[in-house]
């Protein structure tokens, strides 16, 4: 299997491309750069379990109960 592009990983995980780029920025997904500057996600990276925590802050003055 070949490495995936950001678009392919987004489709596979059913998220937006921006979300995948955020994962990359946070270091949650390892990438390699192509000679032309493109991003590829190596296949071994995809077999690693990934946990992404989406924060949902409570606005001040509001109770979470």
Image (cartoon, rainbow, N blue to C red):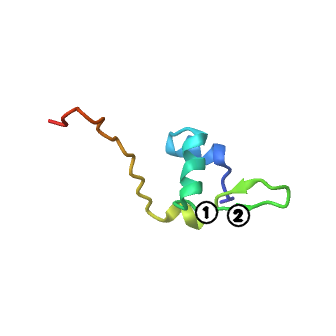
- Whole-percent x, y for residue 10 in the image: 57, 43
Instruction: Please report the residue visible at 50 percent of the width from the left and 39 percent of the height from the top.
Output: 14
Image coords of residue 6 (percent x, y): 65, 48
Label annotation for residue 60 = none
Residue marked by disc 1 = 43
Judging depth in this view, the residue of 50 and 2 nearest the camera is 50
**Residue lying at the far front of the rendered structure:** 61
Disc 1 residue crowd, few under 14, some 14–19, many 20+, Cα 10 Å: few
Reading the image, the residue beneath label 2 is: 32
- Left or right: where does residue 64 sit relative to residue 8? left
Of helix, strand and loop, which one carries label 2?
Answer: strand
Question: Would residue 10 be found to the left or right of residue 49 on screen?
Answer: right
What secondary structure is found at the residue carrying circle 1?
helix
Point 59% across, 55% down: residue: 25
With respect to residue 12, does 44 lie above or below? below
Task: Please report whichever mark, 2 or 1, sits nearer to the chain's N-terminal start.
Answer: 2
Residue in the image at 77% along x and 53% along y: 38
Which residue sits furthest left?
65
Distance between the Cα atoms at labels 2 and 1? Answer: 11 Å
Could you say which quadrant of the image residue 34 lies in?
A: bottom right
């Amino acid at each position: 299997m070949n490495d995936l592009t950001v678009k392919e990983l987004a489709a596979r995980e059913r998220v937006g491309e921006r979300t995948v780029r955020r994962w990359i920025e946070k270091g949650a997904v390892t990438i390699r750069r192509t000679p032309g500057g493109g991003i590829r996600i190596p296949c071994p990276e995809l077999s690693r379990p990934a946990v992404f925590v989406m924060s949902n802050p409570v606005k001040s003055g509001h109770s979470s109960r």
